Image (tube, rainbow, N blue to C red):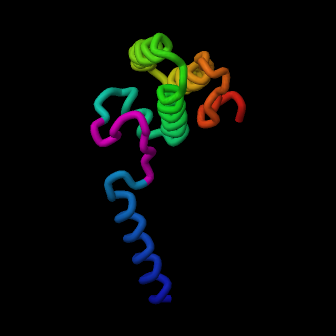
Amino acid sequence: MLFYVAHFVRLLSLAVLCLTLPGFGKANAASFDCNKAETYVEKTICANLELSNLDDLMANNYRVMRAAGIGAGAQSHLKQSQRDWIKIRNKCESIACLKFQYLERSSAICEYPVITGVYPMGCKDPYDF
């Protein structure tokens, strides 16, 4: 019996230690450093695995399209529209709002016209999953 109690105490101690480690069990967004999260939106994204994954997807799509042959005008528009979208995203006050914003933005990024007519394979529309 004493063996089981000692084993339980060790497991409980390990669980408490893991939960106190920085970053353990937290999501990690790709488009910004969660260690520097300051706003409600940033903290919510970092604390929510689904939002963090959507942030990863959006950041990936943005990088892929910035590297694609979309032309100088579209590049400029993509950058400005991203800045504008961040302002809209930052007005969200709920997880549902953030999820909607990320789904819409991730999809919109992939819809930019490509000069070559061949869309990059790395751009993933979240509605295709």
In the figure, 60 relative to 15: above or below?
Answer: above
Total numbered labels: 0
Res. 85 in view: no
Q: Is residue 87 left or right of residue 101?
A: left
Res. 74 in view: yes
Which residue corresponds to the image point at 40% horizontal and 77% vertical from the top-left?
10
**Residue 3 drawn at (x, y percent):** 47, 89
Give residue 14's quadrant in the image: bottom left
Q: Nearer the viewer, residue 3 or 119?
A: 119
Residue farthest along the front direction in this orientation: 116
In the figure, 90 relative to 73: above or below?
Answer: below
Magenta stretch holds residue 81: no
Magenta highlight: main SS: loop
Residue farthest along the right direction in this orientation: 128
Q: Which residues are drawn in magenta? A: 25-36
**Residue 77 drawn at (x, y percent):** 46, 12
In the figure, 29 relative to 21: above or below?
Answer: above
In the figure, 34 relative to 8: above or below?
Answer: above
Q: Is residue 42 left or right of residue 55?
A: left
Which residue corresponds to the image point at 42% horizontal and 33% vertical from the top-left?
44
Q: Quadrant of the C terminus?
A: top right
Which residue corresponds to the image point at 60% horizontal and 36% vertical from the top-left?
122
